[in-house]
Amino acid sequence: MKPRLGSKARKVVGLSLFAGTLMALGCARPQNENWPYYGGNSGGNRYSSLDQINTTNVHTLQVAWTYLSTDTAKADYRPREIQCQPIVIDGILFATSPLLELFALKADTGEELWRFNPFAEKTPRYHSNRGVMYWESGEEQRILYTAGTSLYAIDAKTGLPIPNFGDNGAVSLHQGVGDNLERDEKDLAVIATSPGIIYKDLVIMGSTLSESATAPPGHIRAFDVRTGELKWVFHTIPQPGEFGYDTWPEDTWKVLGGANNWAGMVMDEERGLVFLGTGSPSVDFYGAIRHGQNLFANCVLAIHAATGKLAWHYQIVHHDLWDRDIACPPNLITVTHNGKKIDAVAQATKDGLVFLLDRDTGEPLFPVEEIPALTDFALLGEAPWPTQPQPTKPAPFSRQVLTEEDITRRTPEAHDFVKKRWLETRSGSKFMPLSKEGTLYFGIGGGANWGGNASDPEGILYQNSNEMVWDVKLAEIPSATDPSVTAGRSLYITHCAHCHGLDNKGAPGQDFPDLSQVATRLSAKEIAAILSNGQGRMPAFTHLAGADRDKITAYLTGTEKTDKLPDDIHNPIAAEVEVASGAFPYKPAFTLNGLNKFLDPDGYPAITPPWGTLNAIDMNTGEFLWQVPLGEYPELTAQGISITGTENYGGPVVTAGGLVFIAGTKDERIRAFDKQTGKVLWEYQLPAAGFATPATYMVDGTQYLVIAVGGVKNGHKPGGTYMAFALP
């Protein structure tokens, strides 16, 4: 059965599609309207036909109810992000807490109905969760969602696991990932931070993986929604005999991973196609082992949902060296192009581009040029791809390269500091190979990030954007003759340095904490537990023997012995970089040694404003309707500086009431913008950061706006509250 609502819900959703017609005929509006999918509907439009809250009355919005999903005041609570966009079915709201507990609330009051703890009888594996899925057949109603390494099926009425789904309600996300690999599936670090999509009796899933040499492949899997049985697997890193295999060196599929869908997917039920974007291959910033175009990494994919067979693909980055994974779901949009209505796929990217593709063929509706890319100055063994795709329309919605004109002028001291670093490093091309000296470029934390975008029936795309420069450095991995490389450090270099750097200082702005003084914050037992179970973006290192995890712990706490590992553990720099068939994890010659936001001495972005924007793009013509700053630094506004915009995480919702709702900003506010002009019509100071995408729905004739509040990213205070707003 396809994912459908109960008879009442089906009637409501059907009526909502014709709300404008009903109003024109003088008919009453429906009294209930659902938000049944992550993204609002199966096409990921984040659009609601509700207009009770509109441009004339939105300024009167007030809090209707709040629900504390996690008690952050508990002594043993460790701050975690909450990014979940709830779904609402027949007046019941389903969502998750920062501790990945699933719950059901009355959507008009916030009263809790039931709660499910996935870790009641197992070791917790905490991570971000952005949403859940709903399926119904007859009287059966299920919520499917992921926590740790499991996909759960929970009775939507009772909150109890479905006993005949997998092992008492859970199936392993390892299934289908390790096909034909010479290592156990259980040793692969696989979770899912975004929900999949349901088609008939299939639940189709992506995954979140390590981005280092330990990454498994990011294959797309379909499970039977009733039993949990694995039904099909699409190999995003092709295996011998499959299309795309020749875009990699022979046998690299046995060694490398990535090319995963971590941001979520959308569904065209009429066509039976699921659409998704994939990430970069491992290792993120150094591709000497993977010469070639590297299909299906960095691709928009259309897959036949019933069979897992590829319909078409479109690659937006060839041989990615810049971590330009597709970070948000596609948006299924209908546009008028050359006088003809066309069903299309709009895919926004981290470097501020929008690719508009024909939904049936994958062909671009606006021309895409293959522009020359720099191949000089590449690191040893690297072979950058000579061209990269660039759409001619729409224009980029964020800056593409850092120039001298972009250097901050907030104060003379800030300008001088930033210019000095700019002169010391590389910049000037978005496709410049990375270096040991450092490279300054846009596109790691946005343009578009996981919050995605919204579109209305007129074909207008509403996209928030980050304008942030990053300073990225690579470093040679020390050779076996380096006397500083002890057993624990060697293991750290292979498995940890990609995220935390050779200097152990991490990239806090990218959620890679500084480990140089970790022993002052965590005990050896706590560090060992994180290595075993994972935490946040950190995968569980179950592929390592316990003795090796102990060596890493001893190194980080300064208690290791100075015994050295055998020479073959280390990776000396060599003139030729070869693939060792079946050798996992791959040991690259270079690793990340710095991934930091480029800030001025006072902690503000190193460039001229805006630092975050909200954009309205007419996808019928490819032209911008407006672009406005999103968020502010109140202290700078008080100094007379125009509103700058801020870094932002989470996405927008657009409504028939003429409004775009979005939070996600550093100033911890939620706002309503006039969708015609970009003018702020309402804003509310949240009790913590709203790094999530809102949802809107109607219960008993009242329209509500709800958002998850509590994001610890970038040093924000924790929270675990859901807040709903309504008119007085």
Image: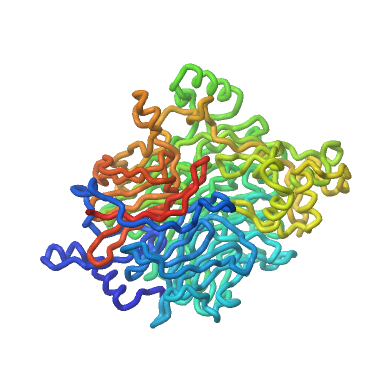
Classify residue 85 by image quadrant.
Answer: bottom left
Task: Provide residue 314's location: percent of width, then percent of height.
Answer: 49, 55
Furthest residue in direction top, as rendered: 412
Q: Which of the pair 199/600 is nearer the observer? A: 600
Up-down relation of residue 163 to residue 266 (above or below): below
Task: Provide residue 420's location: percent of width, then percent of height.
Answer: 57, 20
Whether residue 312 appears in this view of the structure is no
Identify the residue at horizontal 39%, vertical 70% (top origin).
Answer: 269
Identify the residue at horizontal 22%, vertical 54% (top origin).
Answer: 728
Task: Provide residue 143's location: percent of width, then percent of height.
Answer: 46, 71
Colour mapping used in the image: rainbow
Identify the residue at horizontal 29%, vertical 76% (top origin).
Answer: 8
Task: Provide residue 690's location: percent of width, then percent of height.
Answer: 42, 48
Up-down relation of residue 30 to residue 621 (above or below): below
> Going by the image, does 165 lie left or right of 501?
left
Q: Quadrant of the N terminus?
A: bottom left
Up-down relation of residue 108 to residue 682 (above or below): below
Classify residue 447 by image quadrant.
Answer: top left
Q: Which of the pair 468/379 is nearer the observer? A: 468
